[in-house]
Each structure stands twice: as C-alpha cells, then as structure tokens.
C-alpha cells in the first residue's frame, strides 16, 4: 500500500490523501490477508511489536490518514490513551501519621489577626509533633519564626521585634502539607484503605506473648503438683506431651474428617481408604446416577437388584435424608414457616425451644379437633357400626388353606372353596314340586317352572298343569275380579243431539277467544303509541343536548362518565329512525320549516 505524505521543514504533516492502489497490489493484499486468516502467513505487527488479529476488520485496525503520518495498521488508537487517562493515587500512598492539625482560628487569635485564609491553606497547614527540635536558624527559612516551609511574607505568627534570623532562638517547627489523594471508584470504597500491616503484626506478637504466659503458668502448676506428690511422673509426662491439644489434634481425627488446628476449621476428606466408592457399588450404566461434581448419588444403587435397602451398606443419599429425625425436622421447619405467615414470631434457628413447644401444642389441639369433629359427625348422622367392622381379611373370608387347581379349574389338591350362602333356606322343594317358587315368570307374575303354576304353595300338576296354564293365560287374581257393567248402545237421535251440543260449545269458545284477542291488541297498540311518544320526546331532548355540546369548546365540555349505558328499546330505535336526518334526502332542507 503506497501512501504519500508531505512533511515540510517545520515537521507539519500535510493533508494530502494517499494514492489509490493498483489492481495487482490490491490482489496481493487480499491474498496476504487470506493467508494470515488461514494461519499460513505470520500476523501483522504494530509499532510496539504486538501481533494484530487478522480477523479484525480493516476499519478498526487502520489509522486515519490525517492522524498518523506513518499510516501503519495498529490498535493503539483503540486502547485508552495515556495522556487522557486520569491518574489515581497508588495503593501504598496515604496521609502521614502522627501529624496534628492546628485550627486556623486559634492561630489567628494568638497572632491577633481577624482575617480568614483560603480553605486549601487551612487544610494543608499542620504542625509536626514527631520532627526533631531545631535550635539553630537554617538558611532559606522564615526570618520571623525560623520555619522552612514558608517565607516571611507568608508567616502567620506574630511579627517579632527581632526575628529568629538574628536571635537564633524560638525556632518554630516546620508545617507538614498533607498530600491530596485521588481515589478511583474501588479505592473510595476500600474498607482496608490506609491500613498499616505492622499493626496486625503487633496483634500477632501480643497473642504469642499471651500463649507463652499460659504455657509457663501451666508448666509451673504441673511442677508444683509434682513436688507436692499430687501428680505421678507418668501423668506428668502424659500432660506435658498433650499440653498443646490443638497442635496435635490430627492424632485423634475421626474417619472422613480432618481438623486443621491453625485455621480452626473442619475439612472433609473424600473418603476413608477402606470405604467403597459410590460409583463402584453397581457397575450397571442404568443404575443410580452419580454426580461427579458434588460426589452425590441420591438414588439407591441396588434398587434394580432386588436387595432390601435395610440390608445393604449404602442405599443412596436420599435414604439418609429421609430417615431418623430428618422428617420431623422438615415438618418443624414447615410449621415455622406457616406460623410466621400467620403472625407468630417463631424461628427454627433463633428460638428452637419455643418452636418445639408450640408445635407440640399445635399437634395436640389438631388431634383433639379431629376427634371432636368425628364424634359430632357420628352423633349427627350415625354409622358407628360401620367403623367397628371386622378386618378386611375376615370380611372377604380369606384363609390360609392351600388349594391346587388344574388348567381346567378342577381341584387337584386341597378343599375347594365353599360357595357363600345366605341365612335363609335354599333349594327347599315342597308339594311334589321339582323346582322352587320363582323359577318361572310370565306376564309380570312368578310361579313354578315344573308346572307353570302361578299360585304359591300349590300342588304340582306336572306336564298337565303346563298345558292348562298355557291355554288359560288369565291369572288367578284377575279371574276373581267382579265383572263390570256394560254400557247400553245409544240411539241415532241421542248421537245427533250430542254432536250439535259439541258444535255449539266450539263456536262459543271461538267467539270468546276473538273478543279477548281484539281487546288485548287494542291495549297493546295504545301502550306502544304512548311509549313511542315518550321516546320521540327523549330523542328531541338528546338532539338539543348534542347541539349545545358541539357549540362548546372541547376543553369546557363536561364529562359523561356517569352516563348509564344500556341497550336501546324498540321504541327508542324507532324514534331515532324517525328523527334521523339523511343528507341524501331531497326534502331534508324542509324538515326544520
């Protein structure tokens, strides 16, 4: 890429645009870019020697021609510029300690001045209390007081009759101007900002001295007990070995746990050596899922093997969660949440004793309430005998008798199950009948199937009775009924008179109906006319109201949010059609005349 820049003798860069590339140069540039993207050619390097990602677009990596005369691709103009970045104080910078600030008002009162200095001078004026006392006038110091931090014209002390330059006594200490710290967002909110690490070292040394004093006191106490004979030599050696219990706490570790005496926390190991890993208990890939991140296996790995969870050594994490006091703990927590929602100030961790007592009283009251409710229902509706029924096994007559059946249902071994019978006598045949009463039914009557007799407790007649009963189908009860009196036939004259009476009745009924309908129609028409008249008057009022509202300004129109909206009646719709003006009607202009 050929570029042209005009630089004069004074170093001013010209604003001439670069020349256009030839077609061959453009093709070579594109091929080089493709090779760089594929990784076959080395990446382009900026002026600092850093590689430029070939996938970065050209409009980002290229520098504008009017800014950089070199015109070399770089990403420096995309990074924060050092001259525009705000400089903040370092993490180790802080105000000088041991410096006592002097209030300006006290200085002026002592000097006899009443004027007020600027605020920045007040904040920077401090008197050092740790500096060495100066007894000799120094060159370049204030001629009045002898301090090195200001001149005579800026001195705030009382003008002396003979200055410190000539007397050499009463040299004032130098003021210390505290630095002005500029903090960034995190520095302003750092709670350890300005903390001196040496202070913590002093605390560590203090605790070490206390620990040493405790050990010395304990050793002296053991020596006194040993000298008095209260303690044996073996016990003394044992106590001296275990005098630092925290230091040798690793010797009494529990399986699966490690106690760190320095950090005073309990660190849980993976597992003990003798234990079997969870994922090795069942190698079936379809068994319980093992989460390697949390080292958890919630389901039972032996669930598909048919083993009892009580017999295996490990039945999953959920088995441990839902055993022991875990369920009661969860119920207590649930009760605490429900009680807190209803206004009771209880908490499982804050006040467990109060919560446990409240939960017990709640369970007792709940059981009493259920018992009272059950007794009230039984007292009102009854049914105590159904609740006192025998067990289900006795109701269904289940026994432990062993019976074997063949494929056809025949009993091979054992006694066949007895058929359940009622408390009444069954299959009792009387009066020479071969079938029981109720074995035959016809025309709504029961009888005997052997003789088709419909009379109960009758004697069986066999096949002869069947023939007789089929020929005479009239039941015995109907044959006993008394014969009804037959009506005598009417003569022709009586029949003609009855017809004439019926015709007169029909004519009379028609006349009455017609009169009623005419009177009702006339009444309905009058009511409709009155309703239509009222609807027309209401429509006139509505049209006048609309005209008044249309003449008003939009901002002065009243609200009609309280207007009752309901479906219009037939009379209102008819009045609207009669009063509606149609612009296409040629006679519309004459309606108002």
Image (spheres, grey):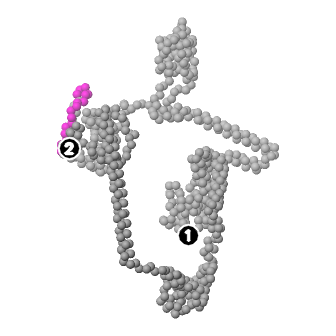
Asked whether, in this view, residue 478 is left or right of residue 378, the answer is: left
Asked whether, in this view, residue 2 is left or right of residue 81, the answer is: left
Q: Nearer the viewer, residue 510 or 532?
A: 510
Vertically, is 20 above or below 294?
A: above
Residue identifier under label 1: 306
Residue at point 58% right, 33% down? 199
* Any part of residue 333 in sight: no
Label 1, secondary structure: give it.
Answer: loop
Vertically, is 364 above or below 192?
A: below
Q: Main secondary structure of the magenta part?
A: loop
> Which region shows up in magenta?
8-23
* Any part of residue 132 in sight: yes
Q: Quadrant of the C terminus?
A: top left
Q: Is 19 contained in the magenta span?
A: yes
In the image, farthest residue toward the right: 228
Residue at point 50% right, 61% down? 289
Q: Position of residue 526 (x, y in %)?
A: 33, 49
Q: Is 37 contained in the magenta span?
A: no
Residue identifier under label 2: 585
Neighbour tally class for label 2: few under 14, some 14-19, many 20 plus, Cα within 10 Å: few
Residue at point 27% right, 36% down? 64
Residue at point 61% right, 44% down? 345
């Amino acid at each position: 890429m050929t570029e042209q820049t005009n630089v004069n003798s004074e170093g001013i860069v010209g604003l001439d645009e670069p020349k256009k590339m030839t077609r061959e140069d453009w093709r070579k540039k594109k091929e080089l870019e493709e090779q760089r993207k594929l990784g076959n050619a080395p990446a382009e390097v900026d002026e600092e020697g850093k590689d430029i990602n070939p996938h970065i677009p050209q409009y980002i990596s290229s520098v504008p021609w009017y800014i950089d005369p070199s015109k070399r691709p770089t990403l420096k103009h995309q990074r924060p510029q050092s001259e525009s970045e705000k400089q903040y104080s370092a993490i180790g910078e802080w105000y000088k300690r041991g410096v006592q600030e002097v209030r300006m008002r006290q200085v002026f009162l002592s000097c006899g001045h009443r004027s007020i200095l600027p605020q920045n001078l007040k904040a920077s004026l401090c008197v050092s209390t740790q500096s060495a006392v100066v007894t000799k006038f120094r060159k370049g110091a204030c001629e009045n007081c002898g301090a090195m931090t200001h001149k005579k014209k800026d001195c705030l002390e009382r003008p002396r009759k003979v200055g410190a330059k000539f007397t050499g006594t009463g040299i004032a200490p130098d003021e210390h101007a505290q630095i002005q710290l500029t903090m960034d967002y995190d520095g302003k909110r750092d709670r350890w900002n300005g903390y001196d690490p040496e202070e913590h070292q002093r605390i560590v040394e203090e605790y070490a001295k206390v620990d040493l004093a405790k050990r010395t006191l304990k050793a002296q106490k053991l020596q006194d007990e040993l000298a008095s004979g209260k303690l044996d030599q073996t016990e003394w050696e044992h106590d001296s070995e275990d005098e630092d219990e925290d230091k040798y706490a690793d010797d009494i570790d529990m399986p699966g746990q490690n106690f760190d005496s320095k950090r005073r926390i309990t660190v849980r190991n993976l597992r003990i050596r003798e234990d079997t890993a969870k994922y090795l208990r069942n190698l079936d890939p379809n068994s319980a899922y093992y989460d390697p991140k949390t080292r958890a296996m919630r389901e039972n790995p032996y669930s598909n093997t048919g083993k009892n969870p009580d017999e295996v050594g490990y039945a999953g994490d959920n088995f441990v969660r839902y055993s022991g006091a875990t369920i009661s703990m969860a119920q207590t927590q649930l009760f605490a949440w429900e009680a807190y929602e209803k206004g009771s100030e209880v908490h499982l961790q804050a006040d467990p004793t109060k919560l446990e007592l409240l939960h017990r009283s709640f369970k007792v009251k709940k059981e009493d309430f259920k018992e009272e409710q059950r007794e009230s229902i039984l007292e009102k509706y009854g049914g105590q005998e159904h609740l006192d029924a025998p067990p289900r096994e006795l109701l269904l007559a289940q026994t432990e008798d062993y019976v074997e059946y063949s494929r056809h249902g025949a009993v091979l071994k054992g006694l066949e199950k007895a058929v359940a019978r009622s408390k009444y006598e069954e299959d009792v045949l009387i009066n020479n009948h071969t079938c029981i009463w109720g074995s035959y039914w016809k025309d709504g009557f029961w009888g005997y199937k052997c003789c088709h007799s419909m009379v109960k407790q009758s004697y069986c007649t066999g096949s002869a009775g069947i023939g007789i009963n089929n020929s005479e189908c009239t039941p015995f009860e109907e044959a006993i009924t008394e014969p009804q009196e037959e009506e005598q036939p009417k003569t022709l004259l009586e029949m003609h008179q009855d017809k004439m009476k019926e015709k007169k009745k029909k004519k009379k009924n028609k006349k009455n109906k017609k009169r009623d309908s005419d009177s009702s129609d006339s009444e309905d028409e009058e009511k409709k006319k009155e309703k239509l008249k009222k609807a027309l008057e209401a429509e006139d009022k509505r049209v006048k109201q609309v005209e008044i509202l249309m003449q008003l300004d939009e901002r002065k129109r009243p609200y009609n949010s309280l207007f009752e909206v309901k479906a219009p009646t037939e009379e209102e719709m008819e009045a609207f059609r009669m009063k509606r003006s149609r612009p296409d009607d040629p006679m519309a202009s004459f309606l108002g005349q």
